[in-house]
Amino acid sequence: MSSEQQLPTRQRRPSATAPIVDIQGSVGPAGVTRPKHRRTFTGFGAQEIKGVEASIPEHMREAWLKHQASGFQNKEQFEKEVVRHVETTLARSMFNCDETAAYAATSLAFRDRLIIEWNRTQQRQTFADSKRVYYLSLEFLMGRALDNAMLNIGEKEVAQNGLSELGFRVEDIISQEHDAALGNGGLGRLAACFLDSLASLNYPAWGYGLRYRYGIFKQEIIDGYQVEVPDYWLDFNPWEFPRHDVTVDIQFYGNVSKTTDESGKVTAHWQGGELVRAVAYDVPIPGYATPSTNNLRLWSSQASGGEFDFQKFNNGDYESSVADQQRAETISAVLYPNDNLDRGKELRLKQQYFWVAASLYDIVRRFKKTKRAWREFPDQVAIQLNDTHPTLAIVELQRILIDLEGLDWDDAWNIVQQTFGYTNHTVLPEALEKWSVGLFQHLLPRHLQIIYDINLFFLQMVERNFPKDRDMLSRVSIIEESQPKMVRMAYLAIVGSHKVNGVAELHSDLIRTTIFKDFVTIFGPDKFVNVTNGITPRRWLHQANPKLSALIATKTGGPEHFLKDLTLLNKIELSVNDPAFRKEWAAIKLANKQRLADYIKTTTGVVVSPQALFDVQVKRIHEYKRQQMNIFGVIHRYLVLKSMTPEQRKKVLPRVSIFGGKAAPGYWMAKQIIHLINSVGSVVNNDPEIGDALKVIFLEDYNVSKAEIIIPASDISEHISTAGTEASGTSNMKFVLNGGLIIGTCDGANIEITREIGEENIFLFGNLAEDVDDLRHHHTYGQDHKIDPSLDKVFQAIQSGTFGNADDFNGMVAAVREHGDFYLVSDDFHSYLETQELVDKSYADQELWVTKCITSVARMGFFSSDRCINEYAEEIWNVEPLKPETNSGVPKTEL
Ligand code: 26Q
């Protein structure tokens, strides 16, 4: 009789052939046997389903099986769930169930549905023993979760009908939710789109990030100026699950000693310093039309001794024990609001290490439970670095392997390099992360030693292979020999990864030929690849623009098809000349514009006509993105209108210029730009001579949920960065996908959008990336820097006080006139104005315009983040999807 059979039933250990798995992805008990790793896993067979079931202790199995079938399948059951949550979970009465309570209860009802699939997905992944992807990003700009959950699960209609019977409109309930705004802009939203695609495509994948108490600040516009207000978003967040049992103590500061054993092997010991506790919070990530539900794990910081340091507390040192607690909590308190700017703040480096160390501990712990040999680590784990922010993960894994696990340097380093991939998102020098050696020495002394060793071995290799190029060593050294010495994080990321990618073709070419040129020479061209960004059509078409999605569905065989394979959009091109389709298309755009006009009226008080051309630029405010050029163009338009007779003005195509975006709080020039836009708006919008011919709107606090209203309403959107500066841009894709055209420079993904949709469907202008260096040189050293006469008139208007105190805008004018015009506004201004005129003319021909819009949407299939994720999976991660079972009683089958 085995020892197992002797146990009383209630204490019986689970079957030894099936692992116990939970959402934490942990397996138990140790030493279980499992199927061999397989490259392609096509789903559970009947036997394997039994395997998962068998992992549930016998005395729990019946209850477990009943639970699997729970959740709501129809309107009545949904309503019952909502009422139950209001009356029990929320401890309120239906008698006073307001929209807040209805939102909470609806979310809880959907959350219950998600949790079941979430658990199953983790069980499935662990049972299959498949390789997982870990996406490390300091930013996840998720936006709202409820609408997304409803649509991805496929039960929005049920909820809509149920809520309606309870007296609510589903839109009102959805809009109760506070955006999860744990990101600045493009990089953070890309991470969110990637999570959606990873789950929708059934890839075993986890995101790892920080659970900031404050996300990106809320922007208020007061007297035309940006004012920042903290974004405390965690009041009620039904989408996160605290895992108080999943904690890791993270070490900072301290010192390093070394010991040598009998065999002469030296081991480093990092001792002393300070401990901060990382606590896991998990967020379920549902896939679209699949039960697969992945996990986003966000770490929150706490004092490691629990609530207080009891010793200090008991000694009466109450204040200092509270101070310790606050210092620990500060680490995950706030998202840095800089986008594309590195400020070198100690707390930021602390955030990075805290998050990276906790995540790696978690990943390594999960791997160790499989009892595999260390060399198999890269077969089980792929880690993607979202920019250089998580680069310390490379050093941390090397430290774990050599200091804690006793591996040789070379074996460890091979594992590290095979595990990591690094995505670069910028070529702007001010955004490339560097940390001073002194700060590293203080905060992470052992990591600095390891970085020095990585650099030493790397430089030795370079010296061996390129003995003639003596300068090469200082050019590529991870340590910059400046005063003070700096650690170059991008170089560390390249050296520690097996693949480095840019995010659009031009950008990938630029990094290969400029900032990382030497590394291409050293490692060869195969290490440097391009993966052009993409966006999830579930959020950016189906959710943001339900009417257009429904119309497209009529030509593509239903939403579940084109939303899973966006190339099917090409079918709508067959209907481009179908009058009924075109009419419906135009009506939808008008309705979306009306929705935005209503929003503008409510939030700004300004009335705009939905018949006008809506011209939109919404994105972070930055000189390289050139919102200043846009507003100079608006001023030009205003001056032209003012010079016309009333009769002439009546014939002008009315335009609404819409801006939105946040400036980093310390970015003075960006704040000046916001101020100028608002000042121009208050003059133009109140000028009775102008009327509807021109309106200028600044929408406060641009975020994901506002983007969902703004983007579908655009006729033309502006993507007008100085050529070579915008790595990709992703809103360009969102606008075109929603039936808007774009005016843009030959930069980032604009170039590939042009390739896909055709030159005749995009308004390109301006100098090319290859000309930028010469133009800048000319500004600095040339004698004859003449600025365009139209721009000169714009400056004269600003400086004569037309838009308020001229001195307020001196800096912006001087940047162009006196300080070398680094972003080449004057060089591109003329061509920008000409192209805007072309936009007006084209819009006047509505028939042709609608043709351009339909054709463009039809050709946007390439820009799905699904395509993008499949490229990462194939070229960088070497992971395969793990399809869910189709016959295990899961309520919904995969489409
Ligand atoms: C760095 C150091 C210290 C503090 C903050 C930062 C920091 C934070 C955010 C640096 C950069 C960012 C964000 C960058 C970003 O959003 N880049 C955008 O990434 C998109 C996705 O690839 C591209 O489409 C955009 O072109 C790129 O600007």
Image (cartoon, helix red, strand yellow):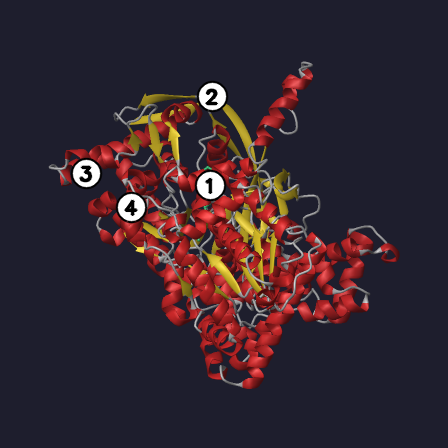
Check contact, mark 3 vs mark 4: CB within 8 A: no
Q: Are circles 3 and 1 on residues that touch, CB within 8 Å?
A: no
Visible in this render: residue 882? no
Extreme residue toward the left, this view? 468
Which amino acid type is marked by label 4? Asp
Task: List x then y, in percent, for residue 891.
Answer: 62, 70
Furthest-front residue in view?
645
| Mark 3 or 1: the one toward you | 1
**Horizontal and vertical percent for residue 527?**
27, 51
Please report the residue visible at 29 percent of the width from the left and 43 percent of the height from the top.
778
Q: Earlier in the sequence, mark 4 or mark 1?
A: 4
Q: Are marks 3 and 2 in contact (CB under 8 Å)?
A: no
Task: Tell me the kind of residue under disc 2.
Answer: Gly
Image spot of residue 166 (x, y percent): 81, 65
Q: Is residue 762 above or below residue 308?
A: below
Q: CA distance from mark 3 to mark 1?
A: 47 Å
Q: Position of residue 95 (x, y in %)?
A: 88, 57
Chain-order first, disc 2 or disc 1? 2
Query: Which residue is disc 3 drawn over?
Result: 462
* Mark 2 CB near ligand 1 (8 Å cut): no
Q: Secondary structure at mark 3?
A: helix
Residue assigned mark 2: 272
**Residue type of the residue flagged with mark 1:** Val
Q: Which mark is residue 813?
A: 1
- Tell me the distance, in whole angstroms, between the alpha carbons under discs 3 and 4: 29 Å
Circle nearer the N terminus (3, 2): 2
